[in-house]
Image (cartoon, rainbow, N blue to C red):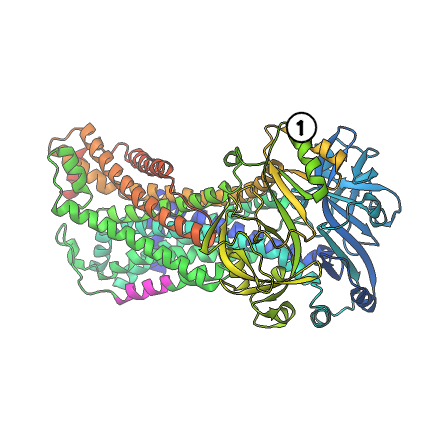
Amino acid sequence: MSFAIKTAWRDARRHRKRLFLCALSIVFGVAALVAIDSFSHNLRVAIDKESMNLLGADLQVSTRTEFSEDAEAWFDELGGEQAREIRFTSMAMFPKNGQTRLVQVRALNGGFPFYGEFETKPANANPAMLDEPVIVMDQLLMAQYELEEGDTVELGDTTFTITGEIVQVPGEAAFAGIFAPRVYIPLSQLEGTGLIGFGSIAFHRVYIKNPDIDTEAVRKDQKERFAEERLNIDTIQERKDDIGEPLDNLARYLGLVGFVALLLGGVGIAGSVQAYLQQKRDTVAILRCLGSSSRTAFSVFLTQICGVALVGAILGAILGIIVQAVIPRVLAPLLPFDLDYFLSWPSILSGILYGTVTALIFGLFPLLPIRNISPLRTLRAGFSQNHTKRDPFIILLAILTAFLLTAFCAAQTSVWWQGIIFAAGLGVAVGILWVVAAILKLCLRKFITPRNYLLRQSLANLHRPNNRTVFLVVSLGMGTFLIYALTLIQDGLLQQTDLAAANEEPNLLFFDIQPDQKEGLYEIIHGEGLEIAEDAPMVTMRLKKVAGRKVADIKNDPENTIDEWILNREWRNTYRAAVGPSEEVVEGEYISEWDGLDEPVPVSIEDGIAADLGVGLGDTLDFDIQGIPMQVKISSMRKVDWTKMQPNFFITFPVGVLEEAPTLWIGVARSPDIETTATLQRKIFEAYPNISAIDLSIVLEAIQSVLGRINFAIRFMALFTVATGIVVLAGAVITSRYQRIRESVLLRTLGASGPQVRRIMAIEYAVLGTLAGIVGVGLAIVAGTALSIWVFKLDFTIPWGQSIIAVVIVTLLTLFTGLANSRGIASHPPLVILREEG
């Protein structure tokens, strides 16, 4: 073993640059894994540390209606210290500048939060314990509208005085108020605003501090006693899960991106080792002649690969530690607490282990065949052995690689079968690229013989002995496939909130319109030169039965698969004679009018909510409409484009059924500019304080702000895959440099000029880049289409122009990298090679 180590070290010193490039193949993949896993570890530690502060209480009970007398008696039984909150959205007007803004009003009393700190400026400005019209407002809202302490705010019929600004609310991230900024007022002042009345969408909450409370017993008691009242219970553990799960999912996704970079690096390791050992075959044969066993020769190069793998993994871990500090800064607004930075040694060590094992496994594929090199190789130049018998160790190594790849992918996804599909998809992509490269070589050898000498020689190089065609097509194609598929999915998600696509869409939403306010409101809108693009009535109702089963029984059924929010929600449905512009009937018949008295009312249901409820055509639903029971029968199913700024509903009734029910109206309009929107909002607030006039462009900008940060994190991690792809490409070119020199010398000896040699190489690299780009982009389009339609539920359109540009970029990148690393080859002196051959 000491001989193997000494020999490996001596040989490695002569090839430091080449081996370092080999190590660089896995650096970026390891860095991505270490950074993401360290971030996840920091996040889990922070969530555990802040667990009591995330909810601000031991128990939270909420509902969308006022608590019943039975519920109030139950709260008394639970005991402990309690606080109340009523939360709803409304328009606020700022007399200082005459502007208005949709805000999230939180009317609070009691000592909430019981855990953590309600951080305000100045300190202790929480209005919960006061009995006067004061308000504290979101810090960003204060800055946006240039408000200061002592200014006034009008909410409904009451004028409030600003006493401070909100810095941090326990358990809430900074982006919690990005759509409707948070404002807090005393609960005692809520009634005077006149904002809570019929049809108001308000959430009633009770916060309970009782460390001795048994949350599981409370939940069981609630299900048995209050199944009909739709009480929602939130505990500290559930809040931890709610915060941690989406961020864990993001971390898993980013981890898969990092793992892809590591796999691509593994492919680079395999190619570099193969080219390196190709030049070491004579050395192995000499060692065999001097009495060394095949095991000893194998150990020499295995030692080198282990060293290269360990160096690359350690360098990657160091880079990952640096990147780890960047991720929390990007995602800080999405976190409800400050995330402390510390080194996660388990993450660092696991990253080093993943990198080392990956490099070792991929390096073994080209290394195992050197065990079969015979001493006879030293006696005849160009002697080679043909081994038709398959090496069982290669087969076992392939099985082990597939198993480890699948296991890691399954561990990185929330559902194990998704990981298996991901791994299988990678395997299929590699197989397709390998087959395409093999077919190309076969066609070039058998059928394609251009008359032009330079073109003929370039294409012949692709199937010459010791060619790198398959390796380059697979590595380039995989890099293109993974990066472009990621780009397509990201673009599809971001297009859902693309403001440019919404230029002709309504950008003003009006809701909570009372029937007797409708005419006056529309006069104000028309006075500003605007038109109502569409309006619709809304009738509030509660779901009582699904396909004949009581909601209470469904909720208590341990095998129930219907989400609780669907069963507990207040349904706001509409009635109209025809489907809306953003809807399409996909099954059944839409009934426009109905006058039947003793039969279930035929309704149209959105296909997504129908799937969630597990119902279809002909099934019945029972609703309670303001105390009046009504059974409906599903006559049609609609596909709704929720991205359209139109009044969309889960269920639509035919005309002639709900006209006499208590109704609110909703409408949308298009405003040409911010000034018109601001003027209209102010006039509506002055005339009808209860009506909310929302500038949808602000909502879209807020969504883009949040998605932009997530998108930056994803694209940032994708850069590691790009960097790895470039390193692998450069490595493939550099490791084949010696072979290129030999070919160049042979061509120049036969009379070819330097420019001709360079053109031959340029055509070869262009063909490889174009082929890899076309296949990689094609695979990305297939994967992007499947994921967009079946996973993300997006309408997918193939961006042909962008795809062509992607192929061109891959081709040019391959051409540039190949020629840049081939400098000097065409001018290499022929005599050097002839002496070596001599």
Rendered view: 818 above or below 357: above
Pick the front one: 832 or 469:
469
Residue 490 coordinates in the image, percent (x, y): 47, 44
Q: Is 253 positioned to the left or the right of 734 in the image?
A: right
Q: Quadrant of residue 525?
A: top right
State the count of labels. Answer: 1
Residue 412 coordinates in the image, percent (x, y): 49, 58
Q: Quadrant of the C terminus?
A: top left
Q: Quadrant of residue 160?
A: top right
Q: Magenta-highlighted stretch: main secondary structure? A: helix
Q: Quadrant of residue 552?
A: bottom right
Query: Can residue 466 be seen?
Result: no
Q: What residue is drawn where x is 51% and y is 48%? A: 579
Q: Which residue is mark 1?
A: 527
Residue 692 coordinates in the image, percent (x, y): 69, 40
The outermost residue toward the right is 131
Q: Is 825 positioned to the left or the right of 121 in the image?
A: left
Residue 117 coordinates in the image, percent (x, y): 78, 50
Rendered view: 760 above or below 431: above
Q: What residue is drawn where x is 32% and y is 60%? A: 299
Q: Is 419 positioned to the left or the right of 673 in the image?
A: left
Looking at the picture, which amino acid does disc 1 mark? Gly
Pick the front one: 4 or 602:
602
Q: Magenta residues?
A: 392-402
Task: Find out whether residue 396 is within the magenta segment.
Answer: yes
Query: Can residue 654 be seen?
Result: yes
Q: Quadrant of the N terminus?
A: bottom left
Task: Find out whether residue 636 is within the magenta segment.
Answer: no
Q: Residues within 10 Å of mark 1 (few under 14, many from 20)?
A: few
Q: Check disc 1 and report its element: helix, strand or loop.
A: helix
